[in-house]
Image (cartoon, rainbow, N blue to C red):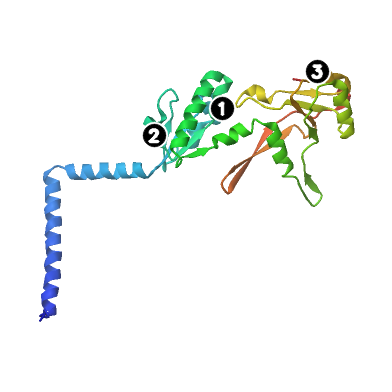
Amino acid sequence: MPVALPRFVLSYGVFATVLCFIIDITEFNKLEGQQNGTLSKSLRIFQSKTKEFNKIKVGICLPEWEKVRLRVGSIFGARLDMSVKDIDMEKSIEEQGPFDIIFHKILKWFDKDPTKGNNYLNKLVHYHKHHSHTAFIDPIENGIMLANRSLTLDLAKQCEFSMGNKSVFLPKYFFPKIAGEELLKMKIRGMGMSYPIIAKKLIGKPGLTESHDMRIVFSEDKLKDVSLPCVIQEFRNHGGKMFKVYVIGEKFYICEKPSIRNLHASDKKNPVL
């Protein structure tokens, strides 16, 4: 038959435990003093390592000229909650990780060296395939898709809307199927497009600055200079300004940038490259 212990016995047991704890703490403090702060130093190192472990690990995958242009140092330099590291694309990415986030402009390497750009792209795609937990800004496939103007224009067309007396719309455009100056003239007239018009490459090479090259045609007699495949789009004056919208999750940012100045068909200039 179990024997009920008196309450004072239990209380004494608790008291004894607390007393032992106090004695242990006292002994610990003595030991710490005897070892000239060695334990305290070790504790600080442990805490430092723990804080470092809890930081968001960010890998920067950018060419040097892009780091300067984007002022990457000023963006990430003051963040105490991040551990930021430049990724050397000549070395194994795995050995430089792991990374929670990789901020990249991988296609920008194509500007200077398409062969190197292609090698780096394949290396980053391979890393992404085997490290699905790593977030990429921007997703690599999105950058490649943006090179296809057929996809981007059709997507932009779906974003048209009106609000009161304001409208957001995409200027008229089409994709010529058959080469020929007269065919282009007929199509442009049939769509009610006015000059000047823009001729852009249908597929831009990923990352290449020349992908932004275009011809601005001021009159019908200059259509002979347009080569296929391309997209023909009506030029709309917009005050020499353009706005880029960057979206990350539920947040968005709007950036104003300089653009082509206002143009008119009466300018009668040669095609502008």
Contact check, label 1 and label 3, Cβ < 8 Å: no
| Residue depicted at 34% across the width and 42% down the height | 53
Out of 40 and 169, give the one closest to the viewer.
Answer: 169
223 w.r.t. 70: above or below: above
The image position of residue 9, as x and y in percent, is: 10, 75
Task: Give the numbered dot on residue 97.
Answer: 2
Q: CA distance from mark 1 to mark 3?
A: 29 Å
SS at mark 1 in the image: helix
Out of 175 and 55, give the one closest to the viewer.
Answer: 175
Q: Quadrant of residue 100?
A: top left
Upstream in the sequence, badge 3 or badge 2?
2
Q: Amino acid at mark 3?
A: Asp
Q: Amino acid at mark 1?
A: Leu
Q: CA distance from mark 2 to mark 1?
A: 21 Å
Upstream in the sequence, badge 2 or badge 1?
2
178 w.r.t. 36: above or below: above
Out of 247 and 187, give the one closest to the viewer.
Answer: 187
Q: Which residue is mark 3?
A: 225
Out of 98 and 39, give the one closest to the viewer.
Answer: 98
Mark 2, other Cα within 10 Å: few <14 / some 14–19 / many ≥20: few
Q: CA distance from mark 3 to mark 2?
A: 50 Å
SS at mark 2 in the image: loop
The image position of residue 220, as x and y in percent, is: 88, 23
Q: Which residue is mark 1?
A: 107
Question: Would residue 123 appear left or right of 155 to someone viewing this image?
Answer: left
Question: Would residue 226 appear left or right of 255 to someone viewing this image?
Answer: right
| Residue depicted at 46% across the width and 40% down the height | 132
Mark 3, other Cα within 10 Å: few <14 / some 14–19 / many ≥20: few
Q: Amino acid at mark 2?
A: Gly
Residue 55 visible, this angle: yes
Residue 37 visible, this angle: no
Question: Where's the C terminus, which quadrant?
Answer: top right
